[in-house]
Image: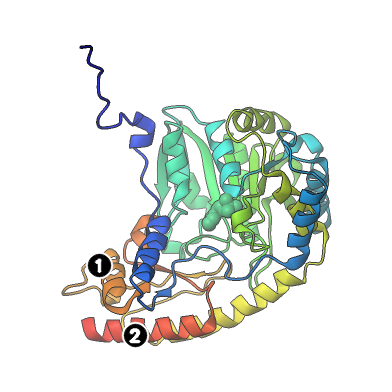
Amino acid sequence: MKTWPVMSPFPVSENVARMQSSATMAAMQAAENLRATGANVCDFGAGEPDFDTPDNIKQAADKAMRAGRTKYTANAGIRELHSGIIDFYRREFGTEYRPGEVMATAGGKQAIFNAVVTLLNPGDEALIAKPYWVTFPEIVVFAGAKPVFIETEETGFVLSAEQVERAITPRTKLLIVNSPCNPSGRVLPPAEFRRIMELTSERGIYVVSDECYLRFVYPPGEVFSAASLPAELRSRLCIAGSFSKTYAMTGWRVGYALAPADWTKAMLKVQGHSTSNANSIAQWAAVEALTGPQDSVGVMLAEYTRRRAWLLNALREIPGIKCSEPEGAFYAFPDVRGCLQKDLKTSGDFAQKLLEEEHTVVTDGAGFGAEGFLRISYATSMEQIQEGVARIKRFVEKHI
Ligand SMILES: Cc1ncc(COP(=O)(O)O)c(C=O)c1O
């Protein structure tokens, strides 16, 4: 009888084998597993708003479905969404993007993926500041290129043009910037952002600016997009934007890329052979998000402001914990190195034992390239925050 070769274990491609699984998704899974046992979990792991999608957006989706807008759309998305995005950037930042420079994507993540894989070749280097969003290095690795990390602790996790300059080599092709930053919540001051863009323009380095948290900046900080820079500083720039956080639409999977026409054309090729287009109904919902009432954004920001103030004060009162002020997004990124001793040797031990002993989920900073730190998401209710911080305090007092 003929025997067939058994493929075991599955022969994962080299590029994928080099990728790490997501630390943030692991934290989400840990919370889920614990909840399934009936435990009362305090979850600071969430990377998404705890608010519901505003009703006007849901209604627009409902209307789109009933009107039969349930088919494939153009590869780049619907014209109405392009206009909404272009109008938004003209109104807010005075920038005139053209239709061939914008495309709708399945979330900001796909915009970043498209941008990176269309640019990098094996041997190329991509600069990524620490701490970084977990996905950046993995997409670079997937493209067969090399992530080169920039240490930023000396500047309080705010990237500077000098740090970028020191990291540049003849192989540097890309810099990925993320402001407001996940996980640190830090915001790049506009003047520094400009200096970085001047440097990369001068050196012919491409930039992906991940602006998924664009609208969540706390006064007196200012909302700033690289789109507002002069055209000569934007000729190698791709902006990745998202509806996920701004309009509490993480599950809808809709975002966008803004980039020069030739880069956009390449990204459309990748998208055309992978996801085709962003979800048609979500695109119509996104049109309403951009063009309808904006009060929900202010409501969320006001609530995050209130939680942030309470959380920062409370964390700073716990012995061994230091926490700088996040100017944007919805994460605190405390330094817990002062608590690491005896049985807590790393921030990973801290996170793991906190989960086991206090049923409280935080994300280990090591997954973001910052061992000794924890990411605490305050996209959860004030009651949960207060209960969770009480548990962290009890935990620290027990262990140090
Ligand atoms: C820094 C950053 N960029 C991009 C994304 C992608 O968001 P989405 O694909 O939902 O738009 C996230 C989501 O957590 C993020 O934190």
Q: Is residue 7 above or below residue 248?
A: above
Of mark 2 and mark 1, the one earlier in the sequence is 1
Tell me the kind of residue under disc 1. Answer: Asp
167 sits to left or right of 107: left
In this view of the protein, which residue sits in the foreground, 363 or 137? 363
The quarter of the rendered structure image containing the C terminus is bottom left
Q: Disc 2, disc 1: CB below 8 Å?
A: no
Amino acid at circle 2: Lys
Q: Looking at the image, is 342 positioned above or below residue 366?
A: below
| Image: 184 above or below 311 | above
Quarter that holds the N terminus:
top left
Label 2 neighbour load within 10 Å: few <14, some 14-19, many 20+: some
Residue 27, how many percent across, how many down? 38, 62
The percent coordinates of residue 53 (x first, y second) are 67, 65
Per the image, label 1 sits on a secondary structure element best described as helix
Examine the rendered structure and indicate whether residue 121 appears above or below residue 157: above
Q: Residues within 10 Å of mark 1 (few under 14, many from 20)?
A: some
Residue depicted at 32% across the width and 85% down the height: 319
Outermost residue toward the top in this view: 1
Q: Nearer the viewer, residue 84 or 182?
A: 84
Q: Which residue is mark 1?
A: 349
Q: 264 and 324: which one is in front?
A: 264
Q: What residue is shown with label 2? A: 393
Which dot marks residue 155? none
Q: Secondary structure at mark 2?
A: helix
